[in-house]
């Protein structure tokens, strides 16, 4: 015979284990008002206690861990110096006359270090003409050099603007002094000594903060949910689930702010911050920007990028971090020259087996003297960030050189080798601000104030150093 268990409110005793006892049985009576929000129904609903991960792994960080490093610093600013080019060259020169060249571009003051008796090559990109000349006089004030071509009388036929001039050597007469001038005797303009020049860059760290707050009352009501978090842990959590997501979101911000950061410009109305130079800003200002790369242009467009890299550091190994469409464009570009149906080589290594799955993607390739390793960048694909934005001037990928660069460290006073891309964070023996977290309040184990809540605090102070940005390429939409 079945028994009906209808304990009163005062007789309900919770069990320490999940056991079916008379003392912990809850009966939901019918609700005459038909209110379905009070669980006043005959049977309990079937509840899935496990959370559905409909967006997969939602974290976006990891990019900087793959391409760079993190190093401490103690100052409000990081300063580094980068070498300039070794050889003497001038672009955008003009012709005041057929035997003189103005090294200045649009009236911009430059440093003239071309000495008399130097031999130079004059190139005209417009007409394709070139002339090798001997410099007979050089004015350091006006930036004008006087030349005598070796094979012709003057520069007749050359365009008046947009010329390129570079030094390839020198020629002196017998018995002349290097400090002598145009005639080779002990008269004339002095030899111009070339002092090494470097370009100095700097960046400042920004302070990032975040906080999660849960009241003491909410902590007293436990709602268990089985979850799997992005940091690899799983199990039953209640309010700490939100704390875990706050931490993960903050860790993403640590990286995203290093990518998207901007310094406060002259036109900005911001007075309470200075900003920081992120990856996109550094490459846009000091690197190379490629607009509108598509598979239809194929190797012609990509070869133009390689030719530009040849004029820079020509670093052999590079990494491509791309959004989905640009990644597919690279695959299509490589497939067009590796198509077995058209008599070319097949995709990868398939051993001519018709049962093997066809791999239509490429993870790396070599072109010219460069190696490229391609990977999808989740940050550019995620709908909560730049994913799906598209359109003109959208960020579609970035090329980052692998390896390290040599720079002069102002603090250490010596040349050091560091990754091209790395993060500097504030730290000392007393305080490490790379990633701080602490509890305040009077709940959840924290007893630091009279606040009836638990506050989980996060803080970091950091900036990104982008060295040798001239070797980076930023891909943008047309």
Image (cartoon, rainbow, N blue to C red):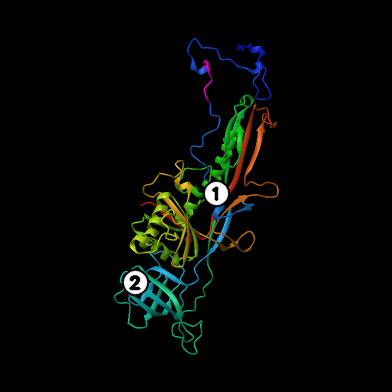
| Residue 364 included in the magenta stretch of the image | no
Q: Earlier in the sequence, mark 2 or mark 1?
A: 1
Whether label 2 touches label 1, CB < 8 Å: no
Residue 381 position within the rendered picture, expressed as x and y whole percent measured from the top left: 45, 46
Q: Tell me if residue 262 can be seen.
A: no
Residue 202 lies in what quarter of the image?
bottom right
Where the N terminus falls, by quadrant? top right
Locate residue 21: give its quadrant. Answer: top right
Q: Which residue is mark 2?
A: 124
Q: Badge 1 is on which residue? A: 62
Q: In the image, is residue 43 part of the stretch drawn in magenta? A: yes
Residue at the (63%, 46%) spot, across then down? 433
Question: Left or right: 423 with respect to 295?
Answer: right
As drawn, the label of residue 118 is none
Question: Which element type, helix, strand or loop, lies under badge 2?
Answer: loop
| Nearer the observer, 150 or 351 | 351
Nearer-the-camera pick, 11 or 276:
11
- The location of residue 36, given as percent across then percent down, is 49, 17
Identity of the residue furthest to the top in this view:
32
Position in image of residue 353 (x %, y %): 43, 58
Q: Is residue 42 visible?
A: yes
Kindly state the secondary structure of the residue where label 1 is placed.
Answer: loop
Is disc 1 surrounded by few (<14), some (14 to 19) or many (20+) residues within 10 Å?
some
Give whichever of 223, 182 is nearer the camera: 223
Check the image and name the residue furthest to the front.
Answer: 1
Q: Is residue 180 above or below residue 454?
A: below
- Looking at the rendering, the stretch of residues picked out in magenta corresponds to 38-46
For the stretch drawn in magenta, what is the main secondary structure? loop
Where does the image place residue 405, in percent across and percent down from the top left? 56, 63
Closer to viewer: mark 2 or mark 1: 1
């Amino acid at each position: 015979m079945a028994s009906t268990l209808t304990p009163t409110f005062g007789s309900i005793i919770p069990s320490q284990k999940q056991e079916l006892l008379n003392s912990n049985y809850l009966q939901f009576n019918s609700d005459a008002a038909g209110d379905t929000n009070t669980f006043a129904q005959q049977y309990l609903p079937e509840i899935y206690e496990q959370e559905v991960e409909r967006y997969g792994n939602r974290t976006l960080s990891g990019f900087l861990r793959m391409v760079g490093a993190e190093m401490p610093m103690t100052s409000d600013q990081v300063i580094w110096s980068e070498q300039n080019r070794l050889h003497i060259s001038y672009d955008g020169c003009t012709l005041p006359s057929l035997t003189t060249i103005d090294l200045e571009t649009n009236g911009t003051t430059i440093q003239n270090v071309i000495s008399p008796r130097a031999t130079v090559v004059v190139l005209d990109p417009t007409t394709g003409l070139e002339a090798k000349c001997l410099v007979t006089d050089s004015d350091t004030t006006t930036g004008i050099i006087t030349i005598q071509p070796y094979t012709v009388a003057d520069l007749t036929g050359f365009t008046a603007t947009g010329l390129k001039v570079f030094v390839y050597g020198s020629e002196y007469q017998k018995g002349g002094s290097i400090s002598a001038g145009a005639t080779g005797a002990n008269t004339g303009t002095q030899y111009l000594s070339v002092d090494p020049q470097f370009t100095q860059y700097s960046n400042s760290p920004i302070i990032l903060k975040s906080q999660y707050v849960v009241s003491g009352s909410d902590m007293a009501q436990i709602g268990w949910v089985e979850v799997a978090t992005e940091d690899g842990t799983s199990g039953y959590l209640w309010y700490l689930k939100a704390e875990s997501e706050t931490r993960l979101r903050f860790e993403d911000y640590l990286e995203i702010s290093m990518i998207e950061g901007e310094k406060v410009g002259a036109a900005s109305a911001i007075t309470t911050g200075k900003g920081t130079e992120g990856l996109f800003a550094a490459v846009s200002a000091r690197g190379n920007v490629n607009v509108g790369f598509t598979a239809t242009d194929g190797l012609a467009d990509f070869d133009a990028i390689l030719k530009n890299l040849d004029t820079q550091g020509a670093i052999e190994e590079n990494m491509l971090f791309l959004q989905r469409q640009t990644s597919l464009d690279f695959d299509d570009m490589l497939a067009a020259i590796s198509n077995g149906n058209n008599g070319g080589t097949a995709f990868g290594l398939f051993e001519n087996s018709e049962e093997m799955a066809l791999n239509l993607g490429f993870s790396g390739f070599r072109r010219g003297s460069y190696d490229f390793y391609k990977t999808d960048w989740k940050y550019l694909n995620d709908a909560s960030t730049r994913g799906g934005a598209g359109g003109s001037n959208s960020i579609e990928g970035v090329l980052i050189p692998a390896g390290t660069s040599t720079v002069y460290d102002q603090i250490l006073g010596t040349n050091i080798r560091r990754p091209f891309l790395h993060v500097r964070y504030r730290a000392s023996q007393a305080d490490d601000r790379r990633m701080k977290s602490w509890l305040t309040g009077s709940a959840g184990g924290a007893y630091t104030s009279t606040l009836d809540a638990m506050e989980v605090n996060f803080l970091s102070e950091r900036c990104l150093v982008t060295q040798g940005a001239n070797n980076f390429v930023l891909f943008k939409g047309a």
